Image: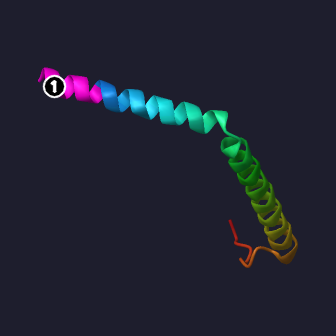
Amino acid sequence: MDKAGGFGMIVAGVFLIVLGLFVQSGIVEFLLDIIGIVIIIGGAIIGIIGIVKLFSGGGSRSSDY
């Protein structure tokens, strides 16, 4: 059981080293920029679709309720 615990600590250490190198590189900032642009474009598309549905009646008939 002690060997498994030691191995787990080694894996955690290597993971933290790799994660630290990844964060220090410019890759994370670049990926966050791309994700932000995709979210903005997606929001604009959904907003436009919503406006079109609002003015076209949404494709549903009015009910008697």
User: Mark 1, residues whose alpha carbon is within 10 Å: few (<14), some, or many (≥20)?
Assistant: few
Q: Does the magenta stretch include residue 16?
A: no
Residue 12 higher or lower than 45, as above or below: above
User: In the image, what residue type sits under mark 1?
Assistant: Lys
**Percent position of residue 4, x then y:** 18, 28
**Percent position of residue 16, x then y:** 47, 29
Name which quarter of the figure residue 24 lies in: top right
| Magenta stretch bounds | 1-8
Secondary structure, magenta segment, majority class = helix
Check disc 1 and report its element: helix, strand or loop.
helix
How many numbered circles does the render carry?
A: 1
Query: From the image, which quarter does the N terminus lie in?
Result: top left
Name which quarter of the figure residue 22 lies in: top right
50 and 54: which is toward the camera: 50
Q: Which residue is drawn at 77% across and 64% down?
A: 46
| Residue designated by label 1 | 3
65 and 2: which is toward the camera: 2
Q: Residue furthest left?
A: 1
49 and 57: which is toward the camera: 49
Residue 14 higher or lower than 44, as above or below: above
Q: Residue at x 80, y 66 (%)?
A: 45
* Residue 50 as seen in the image, left or right of residue 23: right
Q: Which residue is drawn at 81% across and 74% down?
A: 57
* Residue 11 as seen in the image, left or right of residue 59: left
**Percent position of residue 5, x then y:** 21, 23
36 and 6: which is toward the camera: 6
* Residue 46 as seen in the image, left or right of residue 13: right
